[in-house]
Image (spheres, helix red, strand yellow):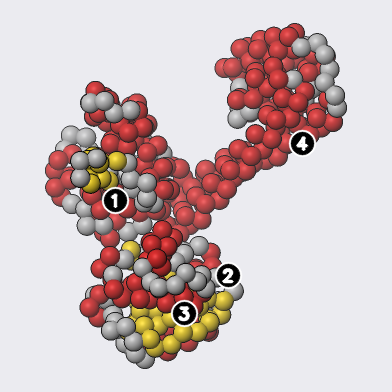
């Protein structure tokens, strides 16, 4: 549907149970405003009522779980859906009189902002089943990574309570399976001392053979450095063992999830294309592909870079401000994935490495130089995905021109 064909903008302030909808025509006439139950029948009735006044376009302020039923029904009816980010919503609300924060006002602002700025809205693409599956799996992987980080921090705090030196020796290595096995079995300095250096090394060696000798020596040095037994050591040991049990389960689930993500990613036609570019493995590739969605919705690589927040922002005001600065907005999940891929590419891809060193020679710091690499690769990624062409380092220019 072309923008000129839209007759009614329906702003929907999303909620878990009851949305609030405001329908406004393109000339600013308010058609209706009412609460809408997050239910198939109620949503279909909303679209029917709005459709009696012209072609409908929905405008929403969130795309999380509560919006999935509305998005699915809109896709089945070929109703276009625009997404207004939280920052855009706050700035738009400031343009209107009043400071009230209510569902009816938010829905009205969405509808009125959309009808005035239809050409500037981010229109959601209709994603296929594999992309939706990738988004769900990526979200679960992020949740598990957050849980693992929380458990590790809590475990390191508990280790500090029994032996600061022991925490320094193993705290940063709790991601290693062999170290987890050791501390889960002997969780206190007293237990480790009674086990002996040989058993410590052998326990680590079973699943982390490369670091077994070095870590065992550091642990034994930490044990020799502290002879006093701190209060409640046995209780802390029980807590540490319990936390490491949780961490082991989380780590095992992430391994299983990584397999699911890889299978889903590589089963998508564009996943097989993206993985040919240096830096994109199953996790980063899956996250990138899921966040980009339909690549044809971006006119060129510059639009994709702007969406990801990788394009610099110009600041020019009189004589005091004159320069370009890092963009703080954009899709942060996509930006992080592209940053990680670019960082890996600077280590293993000669072209990316040369461009990174050139930016460093210009005086840019490490992160800024990696972002420059990620921005440059946006053109290449856009060309690869829109043409479904795997990466060929021998003809990068032809590929970019093909898009």
Task: Label 4, secondary structure: give it.
Answer: helix
Q: Which sits earlier in the primary sequence, circle 4 or circle 1?
A: 4
Is residue 174 in sight in this rendering?
yes
- For marks 2 and 1, the one nearer the N-term is 2
Q: Nearer the viewer, mark 2 or mark 3?
A: 3
* Tag 2 residue: 16
- Identify the residue under disc 1: 306
Q: Is residue 73 above or below residue 163?
A: below
The tag on residue 242 is 4
Dot 3, how many residues are within 10 Å of its Cα: few (below 14), some (14-19), or many (20+)? many
**Image: 100 above or below 216:** below
Q: Quadrant of residue 115?
A: bottom left
* Residue 43 left/right relative to 26: right
- Does label 2 or label 3 sit earlier along the sequence? 2
Please report whichever mark, 2 or 4, sits nearer to the chain's N-terminal start: 2
Closest to the camera, between mark 4 and mark 3, is 3
Residue at 22% across / 57% down in the picture?
299
How far apart marks 2 and 3 lie (CA) works out to 14 Å
Q: Which mark is residue 21?
A: 3
From the viewer's perspective, is residue 218 above or below residue 381? above
Q: CA distance from mark 4 to mark 3?
A: 48 Å
Q: Residues within 10 Å of mark 4 (few under 14, many from 20)?
A: some
Q: Residue at x 80, y 11 (%)?
A: 227
């Amino acid at each position: 549907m072309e923008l000129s064909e839209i007759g009614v903008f329906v702003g929907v302030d999303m909620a878990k149970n009851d949305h609030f909808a405001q329908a406004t025509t393109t000339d600013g006439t308010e058609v209706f405003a009412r609460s809408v139950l997050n239910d198939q029948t109620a949503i279909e009735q909303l679209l029917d009522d709005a459709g009696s006044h012209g072609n409908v376009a929905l405008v929403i302020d969130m795309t999380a779980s509560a919006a999935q039923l509305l998005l699915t029904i809109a896709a089945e009816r070929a109703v276009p859906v625009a997404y207004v980010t939280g920052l855009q919503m706050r700035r738009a609300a400031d343009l209107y009189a009043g400071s009230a924060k209510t569902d009816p006002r938010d829905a009205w602002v969405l509808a009125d902002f959309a009808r005035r700025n239809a050409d500037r809205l981010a229109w959601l693409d209709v994603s296929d089943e594999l992309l939706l599956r990738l988004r769900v799996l990526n979200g679960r992987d992020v949740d598990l990574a957050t849980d693992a980080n929380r458990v590790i921090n809590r475990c390191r705090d508990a280790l500090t309570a029994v032996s600061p030196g022991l925490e320094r020796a193993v705290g940063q290595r709790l991601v290693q399976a062999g170290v987890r096995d050791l501390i889960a079995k002997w969780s206190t300095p007293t237990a480790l001392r009674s086990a002996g250096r040989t058993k410590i090394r052998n326990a680590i060696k079973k699943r982390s053979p490369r670091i077994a000798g070095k870590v065992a020596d550091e642990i034994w040095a930490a044990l020799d450095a502290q002879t006093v037994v701190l209060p409640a050591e046995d209780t802390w040991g029980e807590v540490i063992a319990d936390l490491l049990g949780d961490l082991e389960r989380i780590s095992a689930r992430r391994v299983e999830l990584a397999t699911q993500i890889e299978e889903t990613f590589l089963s998508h036609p564009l996943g097989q294309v993206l993985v040919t570019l240096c830096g994109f493995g199953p996790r980063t590739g899956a996250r990138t592909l899921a966040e980009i969605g339909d690549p044809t919705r971006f006119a060129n690589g510059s639009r994709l870079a702007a969406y990801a927040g990788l394009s610099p922002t110009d600041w020019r005001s009189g004589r005091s401000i004159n320069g370009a600065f890092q963009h703080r907005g954009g899709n942060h999940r996509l930006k992080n994935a592209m940053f990680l891929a670019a960082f890996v590419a600077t280590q293993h891809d000669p072209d990316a490495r040369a461009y990174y060193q050139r930016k460093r020679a210009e005086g840019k710091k490490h992160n800024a130089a990696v972002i420059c690499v990620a921005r440059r690769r946006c053109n290449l990624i856009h060309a690869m995905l829109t043409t479904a062409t795997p990466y060929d380092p021998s003809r990068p220019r032809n590929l970019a021109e093909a898009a």
